Amino acid sequence: MSGTSIDGVDAVLADFSVPPCRSLAHEHGAFAPALRTELIALQQSGADELHRAALAANALMDACAAPVSALLARTGLDRKQVSAIGVHGQTIRHRPELGFTLQLANPARLAEATGITVVADFRSRDVAAGGQGAPLVPAFHAALFATADRHRVVVNIGGFANVTDLPPGGPVRGFDTGPGNILLDAWAQRHTGRLFDREGAWGAQGQSIPSLLAALRSEPYFALPPPKSTGRDHFHLRWLEHHLDAAFAPADVQRTLCRLTAQTIADAINAHCDKATEALICGGGVGNAALMRDLAEALQPRSVATTATLGVPVDQVEALAFAWLAREAIAGRPGNLPAVTGARGSRVLGAIYRA
């Protein structure tokens, strides 16, 4: 899994012989600075874009092949024991309202490098069927975290945040709430030179700006009903800058962005999953202590915990989900939930590149 934070690749070796699944091992491979810079640049149109995108896709697959090799070496498994690799690719455009979503990848190169069948391009079929193509993880969240006696929501905070609603005996729902770490990381990098605000320490030094928070929360996306999804095409530094005043201190803006992420997640849960009594949090946002405090406050009186409390590390949930989606594709089973994405029906997701 390579997410919208564009920091690297998370790879897990997933065992489905123990229902619903378990992670045997995990590897994280950080992106080389040049690749990260190029992947961010490709979020917008530019000179020689197709050529640059093809080269970046090759480099991305090489960055995926490395943790695959590391996982096999660490576990002592032979590649023939692995049924498939599910590779998400790097989202560089997400415009379901125009009928497309684009995840940069070269699955044939990854299949050649590893000698393992690769499943890729999971979102396009759902979009072709009139869906948002996102989020795709709620079906997996349901398999992993749903219970018959508790109404849970699962909140993944990556570059963007998404919520899965798991009412006991009820329909599974899910949608993107808006920015997760995307604005926090970009603003921190601009003003501190670091890729992210470690543990939220810099932002915690500031004070939230009520007028700015109110202006940001007035963004029409937040009031849209599900199904809905979003990405860097919508939320980016230029969007933020439109609301800024020169008098705002950078740390105060960071503190406000932290509140924005927490509050918009809570607003979405209150509006669409109001009966939920528990929230399970995963993703890179868990590492931001200030954000987790804000979220726990905003979600009161619900209990807030991480997926790690149920034995699933917060940085492995998304990668496990795409392993699960790859398994469904190989088996010819649908991987989307039309109630989540808005697609016309259930569809088998992904293109298969046989080893």
Image (cartoon, rainbow, N blue to C red):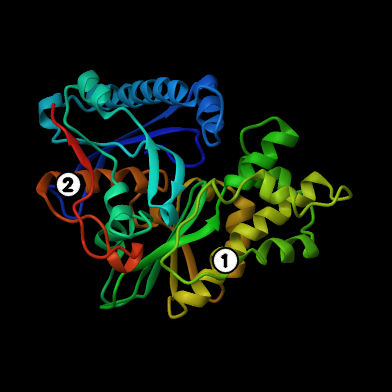
At mark 1, the secondary structure is helix
Q: Quick check: 148 left or right of 33?
A: left
Q: How many marks?
A: 2
Assign the C terminus to one quadrant of the image.
Answer: top left
Query: Residue 22: x percent and y percent?
Result: 23, 47
Query: Residue 126: x percent and y percent?
Result: 29, 54
Report crowding for label 1: few under 14, some 14 to 19, many 20 or more residues within 10 A (C-alpha): some
Residue corresponding to mark 1: 222
Assign the N terminus to one quadrant of the image.
Answer: top left
**Residue at the spot x=52%, y=31% of the render?**
42
Residue 204 in view of the camera? no
Q: Quick check: 354 left or right of 126?
A: left
Compare residues 345 and 19 and report the one nearer the observer: 345
In the image, residue 175 sits, relative to residue 257, either above or below, namely: below
Query: Residue 211: x percent and y percent?
Result: 80, 64
Residue corresponding to mark 2: 329
Residue at the far right: name it. Answer: 247
**Residue at the spot x=68%, y=54% of the render?**
257
Label 2 amino acid? Ala
In the image, residue 140 sits, relative to residue 25, either above or below, namely: below
* Circle nearer the N terminus (2, 1): 1
